Amino acid sequence: MSLLYGAYSPGTPRRARGPFIVLEGISGIGKSTLARVLAARLNAGTLHTVPDFYMPWAPVMNAHTRALPQFAFYLSGALHASDIVRRHLAQGPVVSDRYVSSVLAYHSAVHELDLAQVTALLAPFRTYFAPPDRTFYLRCTDRTLHNRMARKKDRNQDDHDMITVPGRLERLRANFDKVAANDPTAVIIDTDDRTPGELADIITRHLTEPST
Ligand SMILES: Cc1cn([C@H]2C[C@H](O)[C@@H](COP(=O)(O)O)O2)c(=O)[nH]c1=O
């Protein structure tokens, strides 16, 4: 039995019309642009994990709290994102810019923790999360990241740290690779030299193929 019952269970899902698509990857890679293009194509609802109203708290939590309260903050954001997803899925497709994999990959990378330890910390909550149909892990080379970062309008402290804290970018990339390797919904996409429209073509083609 799940540990999450009563008020802690996600409730009976309404008939999902789906699909539920997740975009994952390091900051600046182009997830939010691609989410917009995909949402327009699929007539999908979109959201960001953590949800937008959490975002003003993120720098405050990062600056003032230690690892476990920070984890609880991002976990809370992902749980709430899941509630939003379930609500949207009753209407049609949903595209999420980040989801549970970002919580694992970022928390482990930022605090230099073993990914397996962070995965175990999240495990009791797994049953709450609306499962994605496909999770697209976006990858790019340093050159592409540099060019895309230069164009990113909402660059924040996390983006600065990702580039300047020794080893942060490498840890993030390695963590996303490890999370993807254990994710049955994972599809890895190299985004270099591809426009958002071309990436949306690749993704929509994947959605018409049966998952393995
Ligand atoms: C979901 C999540 C995001 N983050 C970071 C990644 C990004 O730097 C930032 C979200 O901003 P972004 O999605 O606009 O890049 O929050 C964490 O540190 N931990 C998490 O669990």
Image (tube, rainbow, N blue to C red):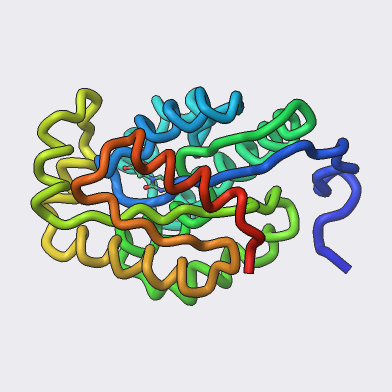
Q: Residue at x 46, y 38 (%)?
A: 97
Quarter of the figure that contains the C terminus: bottom right
Question: Is residue 151 shown left or right of residue 173?
Answer: left
Percent x, y of residue 146: 10, 44
Q: State whether residue 3 is above or below residue 155.
A: below
Ligand 1 sits in quadrant: top left
Q: Residue at x 20, y 23 (%)?
A: 153
Question: Is residue 164 shown left or right of residue 87?
Answer: left
Q: Nearer the viewer, residue 137 or 64?
A: 137
Percent x, y of residue 176: 38, 63
* Count of numbered circles in the view: 0
Percent x, y of residue 36: 44, 26
Question: Is residue 7 shown left or right of residue 175?
Answer: right
Percent x, y of residue 63: 29, 41
Q: State whether residue 172 is above or below residue 203.
A: below
Q: State whether residue 170 is above or below residue 197.
A: below
Question: Is residue 25 shown left or right of residue 85?
Answer: left
Q: Nearer the viewer, residue 190 or 163?
A: 190
Q: Residue at x 30, y 57 (%)?
A: 190
Q: Nearer the viewer, residue 173 or 66?
A: 173
Quarter of the figure that contains the N terminus: bottom right
Q: Residue at x 64, y 62 (%)?
A: 211
Q: Nearer the viewer, residue 147 or 112?
A: 147
